[in-house]
Image (spheres, helix red, strand yellow):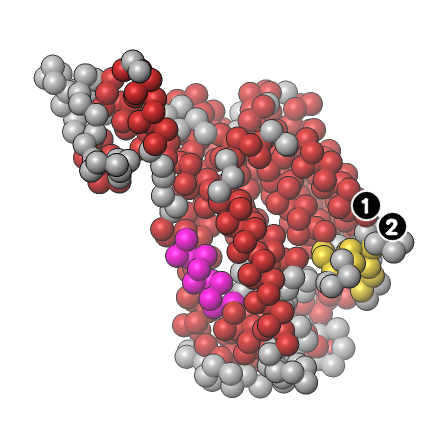
Amino acid sequence: MNDLSRQATRLEAIGGHFDKWLLGAIITLTGLGVVMVASSSIALMSSPFYYLNRHLIFLAVGIVLAIIAMRTELKTIEQYNQVLLLGCFALLVVVFIPGLGSSVNGARRWINLGFSKFQTVEAVKVLYIVWLSSYLVRFRDEVNATWPAMLKPLGVAGALVVLLLLQPDFGSSTLLLAITAGMLVLGGVNLPRMSMPIVFGLVAMSALAIIEPYRMRRITSFWDPWADQQGDGYQLSNALMAVGRGEWTGVGLGNSVQKLYYLPEAHTDFIFSVTAEELGFLGTCLIVGLYALLAGRAFWIGMRCVEMKRHFSGYIAFGIGLWVSMQSFVSIGVNLGILPTKGLTLPLISAGGSSVLMTCVAMGLLLRVSYELDRAERRQAVRMHVAEGEEPIAAEPGRAPGASDVAAAMQDSTPRDGTPRDSSPRGTSRMQQRIEPTLGRMG
């Protein structure tokens, strides 16, 4: 075996680590979710732990799916991008097929699996983010330079939104459009060109909200929930009472009054209000801080991937970060009365079946991105070390170079010939010039 073959073998043996901050935020939010589901649903059924047991079952399945995602190479997933897009449309169409689709309160958003119902839009969010990430990789230059390349993902998102509005699901439609716009901007689209579709979309979605009477009632009740406290403002007024009762430290875990048949959907859409009542302002600050950490870490990982020319991984991190941050912002905003009432769950905390499963899959993908980024950085450090005529990074026998080994190699700034090592940041200057100036350039 020649030197090049041995070096390639050593590089292949180098693995990566999952981002500890990201993993810690996910585990903490999931643990808080289990506690709050147990507390908020204990009085809803004759069996006090019915919803908790159900939540734990879905969470266990979700963890298995997350582990599968964490162990799957992203390049393997990227190969099936077109199949994933077809899956998005198939999942949104199947709910209209008699016998398969299931209707709840006049909305056809679920498919009947026999043992449970699955809300297809939750899977669509994940599949669509992966497809759009692949599209931005394949057409990243054209997206910034031409109208057709920019309009194609907007057209795909528009077609998916039409199917969602037929269900109807206005909240998920708005979220999907927002994710699309955010990923295009982060992917380097020209902002002046992008402004026209954004303005058109805002006008269209506003018109749809106004012309539907029930949506308009939600908006007016959001302005003043106390005007019709027993009618359209019932949910929001009880949510605000729960938040107000919590004060600084809360009334204590399990001591919420509003969850006792006063606050509808206390274990799903309005679980944040119960949390605010029982854990107080300090508890809600902890939750908001954890979501900020999760989303911020996702964006940081995405930027590092772009700098390492791992664009597909970076765009997936951007998309999941946008999804989690926007959905949690809307859910918390609804509970606090700063946004109109919408049926969006609080990721990793709210009880649910399909939302729990697909959020776990998304977190598994995000952790996989962090693993492959760490692995790529370690391998790059070894290549740099060997290319400069130095000995391979020392490690214990039978063990791949660890974080301390790689860090020591990267901190060594003086090669053997005595010339200073270039300290300029490595990565893709092309993407830095294309993304960062684009975000600030209006012409």
- Occupied quadrant, residue 343: bottom right
Mark 2 in CB contact with mark 1 (< 8 angstroms):
yes
Q: Which of 279 and 228 is in front in this view?
A: 279
* Disc number placed over residue 93 in the picture, else none: 1
Q: In this view, does 204 lie to the left or right of 364?
A: right
Q: Is residue 86 left or right of residue 279?
A: right
Percent coordinates x, y for residue 393 in the rendering: 21, 29
Queried whether the magenta region covers residue 266, the answer comes back as: no
At 60% from the left and 62% from the top, the residue drawn is 58
Against 152, is 24 above or below? Answer: below
Q: Residues within 10 Å of mark 2 (few under 14, many from 20)?
A: few
The residue carrying mark 2 is: 97
Percent coordinates x, y for residue 214 in the rendering: 80, 64
Q: In this view, does 154 lie to the left or right of 78?
A: right
At 89% from the left and 54% from the top, the residue drawn is 98
From this viewpoint, which residue is outermost toward the left?
A: 418
Q: Give the range drawn in magenta.
A: 23-33
Q: Nearer the viewer, residue 421 or 373?
A: 373
Which element is circle 2 on? Answer: loop
Q: What residue type is labelled 2?
A: Ile
Percent coordinates x, y for residue 177 in the rendering: 66, 43
Q: Nearer the viewer, residue 174 or 134?
A: 134
Q: Nearer the viewer, residue 3 or 374?
A: 3
At 65% from the left and 24% from the top, the residue drawn is 149
From this viewpoint, which residue is outermost toward the front?
A: 1
